[in-house]
Amino acid sequence: MSSPDLSSPYARFKVLWSYFWGDHAFIRFSFTNTHWVDAKMVRSNQPSPRQLAWWKRQGIKTVINVRGPREEPFYWLEKDACARLGLTLVDAPLDSRDAPLPERILKAREMFETIEYPALIHCKSGADRAGLMGALYRHFHLGQPMSEAKSELGRRTLHNREGKTGVLDVFLETYASEIEPKSVDLVQWVQSDDYDCEAMTRAFRSRWWGDLLVERILRRE
């Protein structure tokens, strides 16, 4: 399905209706799970068009969408709002239940070197993929060791490591504890034969109650 013509009031209403209920936007109107990483980077859950306008007034220049481009209401509305507001929208998709692909780590490093700041990172809930990207920002852009940067992925932002999303913790912690002490760059590691994202994902074992919380109750993406 192609992007609808949002200049039509009826088409916009249908998209907003689907976004409000189907994407759980009604929850995010009063809860944004917003946390500043530093003075130039903030992370949150999926922002609505009105919230994007508010962020524009706060000085945000770039919006990093780690949900990726999709033929879905949230993306149609976000893309339209960013275009109208003069915000740069960068699509940098990440997975929440798989160890990251090497090319996505490389894209993150390049992105942090080229985007205009201040910037906003978001996924759907602001807990998992936004946390991973926040850790990569701390590591690549702020130069923090991963042992410090990985704090972006934690319970304070509602991340749950006991569910399938815990594979993201394994990725960061493996690098911080086993690879970084050898003075091996993160990019070098993910491009080497020592890194196998598929094997890391297969080896991870979540807990049943973590899966119940993440998959059934919270219905995280």
Image (cartoon, grey):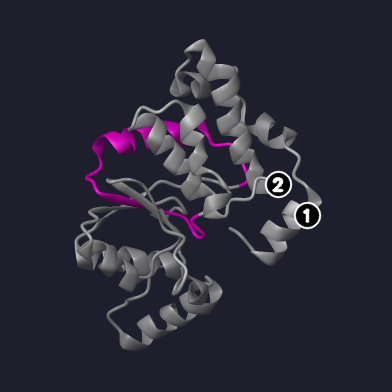
Distance Cα–Cα, label 1 vs label 2: 8 Å
Residue found at x 53% / y 78%: 21
Name the residue type under label 2.
Answer: Glu
**With respect to residue 26, does 150 lie above or below?**
above
Which residue is the extreme one toward the top?
182
**With respect to residue 145, does 2 lie above or below?**
below
> Splitting the image into 4 quarters, where does residue 158 fall?
bottom right
> Splitting the image into 4 quarters, where does residue 51 fall?
bottom left
Residue found at x 64% / y 39%: 167
Question: Looking at the rendering, in which quadrant would you find the C terminus?
Answer: bottom right
Residue found at x 38% / y 70%: 48
Which residue corresponds to mark 2?
A: 162
Q: Earlier in the sequence, mark 1 or mark 2?
A: 2
**With respect to residue 14, does 66 lie above or below?**
above
Which residue is the extreme one toward the right?
208
Residue 38 picture location, percent across and down: 33, 44
- Asked if marks 1 and 2 touch (Cβ < 8 Å), the reply is yes
Q: Secondary structure at mark 2?
A: loop
Residue 153 picture location, percent across and down: 53, 43
Q: Secondary structure at mark 1?
A: helix
Which residue is the extreme one toward the bottom?
10
Labelled disc at residue 209: 1
Q: Is residue 127 visible?
A: yes
Name the residue type under label 1.
Answer: Trp
Does the segment drawn in magenta span residue 52? no
Q: Give the magenta part as a residue range.
A: 97-126
**With respect to residue 6, does 152 lie above or below?**
above
Quick check: 58 left or right of 151? left
Does the segment drawn in magenta span residue 121? yes
Labelled disc at residue 80: none
Residue 166 picture location, percent across and down: 65, 43
